[in-house]
Image: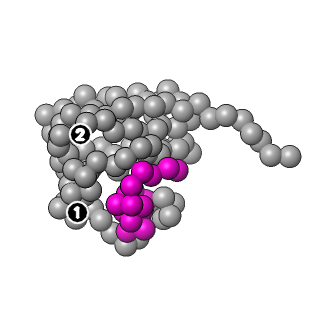
């Protein structure tokens, strides 16, 4: 018998400038979304800019989700600004960081290939 329990998932729409001046606001929103459910679905609207602070927030959110045995996934198109920021910050890697499920790393090359191919569904 398979457990088909529906997961309670928070959905969060991120748009605008995902940069240092908004880091505290973004951290609170992402943390609250993770605390409120079994997982978080991140959707992107019109993203104007992404910087290192946002990439670090996503990495922290992902690590927290793994630690809490919760899910993190992206839905819809990944903004080009996200891909550019990840590449410029040196986040792109061939393997995960070793802190969790290697096949689920946000920055692993095989995941990045999926990002670049268009919509990502987890």
Q: Nearer the viewer, residue 76 or 41?
A: 76
* Vertical side of 101 occupied by 40: above or below: above
118 is within the stretch colored magenta: yes
The answer to whether 37 appears left or right of 110 in the picture is right
Identify residue for label 1. Answer: 87
Q: Is residue 26 visible?
A: yes
User: What stretch of residues is rendered in magenta?
Assistant: 105-122
Q: Are marks 1 and 2 in contact (CB under 8 Å)?
A: no
x 45%, y 31%: residue? 11
Mark 1 Cα shell of 10 Å, populated few (<14), some (14-19), many (≥20): some
Report the Cα–Cα distance between label 1 and label 2: 17 Å
Residue 98, compared with residue 118, is above or below; it is below
Locate residue 64: give its quadrant: top left
Residue placed most toward the observer, 119 or 15: 119
Query: What label does residue 47 carry, if any?
Result: 2
Q: Residue furthest front?
A: 118
Image quarter for residue 75? Answer: top left
Q: Position of residue 30 (x, y in %)?
A: 37, 34
Say which residue appears at 49% left-offset and 27% top-offset: 36
In the rendered image, residue 38, in percent from the top left (x then y), is placed at: 56, 35
Secondary structure state at the residue bearing disc 1: helix
């Amino acid at each position: 018998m398979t457990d088909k329990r529906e997961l309670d998932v928070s959905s969060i729409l991120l748009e605008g400038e995902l940069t240092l001046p908004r880091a505290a606001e973004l951290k609170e929103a992402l943390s609250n979304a993770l605390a409120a459910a079994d997982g978080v679905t991140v959707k992107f609207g019109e993203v104007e800019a992404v910087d290192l602070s946002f990439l670090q927030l996503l990495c922290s959110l992902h690590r927290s989700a793994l630690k809490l045995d919760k899910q993190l996934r992206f839905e819809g198109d990944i903004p080009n600004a996200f891909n550019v920021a990840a590449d410029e910050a040196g986040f792109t890697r061939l393997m995960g960081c070793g802190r969790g499920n290697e096949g689920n790393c946000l920055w692993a090359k095989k995941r990045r290939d999926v990002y670049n191919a268009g919509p990502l569904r987890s």
